[in-house]
Image (spheres, grey):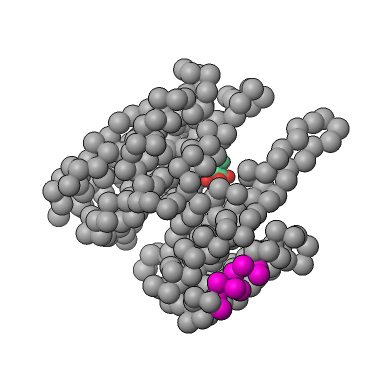
């Protein structure tokens, strides 16, 4: 089987971590007799530099036609104050491909509790799947810029809530059967719509899933107090952005956290949840684990290839369990050395 991957290294540490993910994906494909073709395109700040556009039309076409998009990261202070931000390209890409469901697994690997700033007893057994709505809400509402007054509209339709809630219910059904839906229904109209749509879907199609509603401020606390109590967590766009960064701290580093963004079809976007980390860019310091684990999700969700996905995940876990890692998790490896270890482990 052959798959076309649009490869967008982007900015900051993006090229380093995406390069690692690509290398590992190529090795995994070789091992499982799949053929992957990577096609590189400019994106984000790098594309502003060359094309005056964070998401140029050549890149747009390549993303629309690909089986999957593998992305490094976008953004950096270099493009502050410019006419268009690198991040606008990423939002455009998510919207263009209709990737409304962003899956962000946060799982503490067995024996790795010491990486967590939480006491081991609290960190143990943390295994959460965040399902973050990705193409609506305040990220895409009407925006008014200004020096005296500015506003950002947050809007959701029933259909937008229902389709992402369905993804979360399905995931909960396939996992431990529990779903926590996050909102701010005590203040926001969009949250009251959110809650009523989730309740209706629960009643009609997923009454076997145990559902609770948690206010976003309480969720910020509960994630630290009892993270192991959660199974699937469903959020709107911005709440998911914030809570998934918070949750990534529990597993020891945001550098370990992968993501998959999916829509109606099989094509998806795969990126670590961290940003472009311009302060350490080009120094071989970035943790590529999140990007590599995102490549594993690409095999699983876009290529229906579970074996290579698991092989990559097991290789990363084995390397970490052997005590290797980048500086963010207290290790001595550079980005390249860590990736080489994963590749060597995969060859076993
Ligand atoms: C993320 C990032 C993006 C977001 C930025 C870079 C636009 O923080 O993927 O979590 O806010 O969605
Ligand atoms: Mg974020």
Say if 151 sits above or below 43 in the image.
below
Position of residue 270 in the picture relative to residue 240 (left or right): left
Position of residue 156 in the picture relative to residue 327 (left or right): right
Say if 237 sits above or below 234 in the image.
above
The reply to whether the magenta stretch includes residue 79 is no
User: Which quadrant of the structure image shows residue 199?
Assistant: bottom right
Q: Measured from the top left, where is residue 81 in percent x and y? A: 67, 24
Quarter holding the C terminus is bottom left
**How many marks on residues?**
0
The reply to whether the magenta stretch includes residue 196 is yes
Q: Nearer the viewer, residue 183 or 61?
A: 61
Q: Measured from the top left, where is residue 217 in percent x and y? A: 70, 64
Residue drawn at x 75%, y 32% as measured from the top left: 145
Ligand 1 is in which quadrant of the figure? top right
Q: Measured from the top left, where is residue 114 in percent x and y? A: 45, 64
Residue drawn at x 49%, y 29% as measured from the top left: 55
Q: Nearer the viewer, residue 228 or 65?
A: 65
Magenta part of the chain: 195-203
Say if 246 sits above or below 34 in the image.
below
Q: Measured from the top left, where is residue 227 in percent x and y? A: 54, 70
Residue drawn at x 49%, y 55% as measured from the top left: 101
Does residue 121 appear in this view? Answer: no
Does residue 142 appear in this view? Answer: yes
Q: Nearer the viewer, residue 141 or 24?
A: 141
Q: Nearer the viewer, residue 161 or 219?
A: 161
**Outermost residue toward the bottom in this view:** 208
């Amino acid at each position: 089987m052959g798959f076309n991957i649009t490869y967008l290294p982007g900015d900051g540490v993006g090229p380093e971590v995406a390069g690692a993910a690509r290398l590992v994906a190529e090795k995994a494909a070789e091992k499982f007799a799949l053929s992957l073709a990577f096609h590189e395109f400019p994106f984000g700040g790098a594309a502003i530099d060359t094309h005056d556009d964070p998401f140029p039309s050549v890149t747009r076409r390549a993303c629309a036609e690909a089986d999957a998009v593998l992305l490094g990261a976008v953004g950096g202070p270099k493009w502050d104050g410019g006419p268009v931000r690198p991040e606008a390209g990423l939002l455009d890409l998510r919207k263009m491909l209709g990737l409304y469901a962003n899956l962000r697994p946060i799982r503490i690997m067995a024996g790795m509790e010491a990486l967590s700033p939480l006491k081991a007893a609290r960190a143990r057994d943390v295994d959460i799947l965040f399902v973050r709505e990705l193409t609506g809400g305040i990220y895409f509402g009407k925006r008014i810029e200004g020096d005296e007054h500015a506003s950002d509209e947050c809007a959701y339709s029933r259909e937008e809530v229902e389709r992402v809630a369905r993804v979360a219910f399905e995931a909960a059904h396939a996992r431990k059967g529990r779903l926590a839906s996050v909102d701010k229904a005590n203040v926001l109209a969009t949250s009251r719509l959110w809650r009523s749509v989730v309740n209706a879907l629960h009643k009609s199609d997923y009454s076997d899933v145990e559902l609770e509603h948690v206010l976003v401020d309480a969720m910020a606390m509960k994630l630290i107090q009892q993270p192991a109590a959660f199974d699937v967590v469903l959020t709107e766009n911005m709440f998911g952005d914030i809570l998934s960064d918070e949750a990534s701290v529990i597993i020891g580093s945001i550098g370990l956290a992968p993501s998959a963004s999916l829509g109606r079809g099989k094509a998806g976007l795969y990126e670590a949840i961290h940003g472009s980390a311009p302060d350490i860019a080009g120094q071989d310091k970035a943790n590529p684990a999140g990007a590599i684990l995102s490549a594993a999700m690409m095999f699983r969700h876009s290529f229906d290839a579970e074996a290579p996905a698991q092989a990559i995940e097991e290789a990363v876990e084995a390397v970490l369990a052997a005590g290797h890692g980048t500086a963010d998790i207290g290790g001595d490896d550079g980005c390249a050395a860590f990736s080489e270890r994963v590749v060597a482990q995969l060859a076993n």
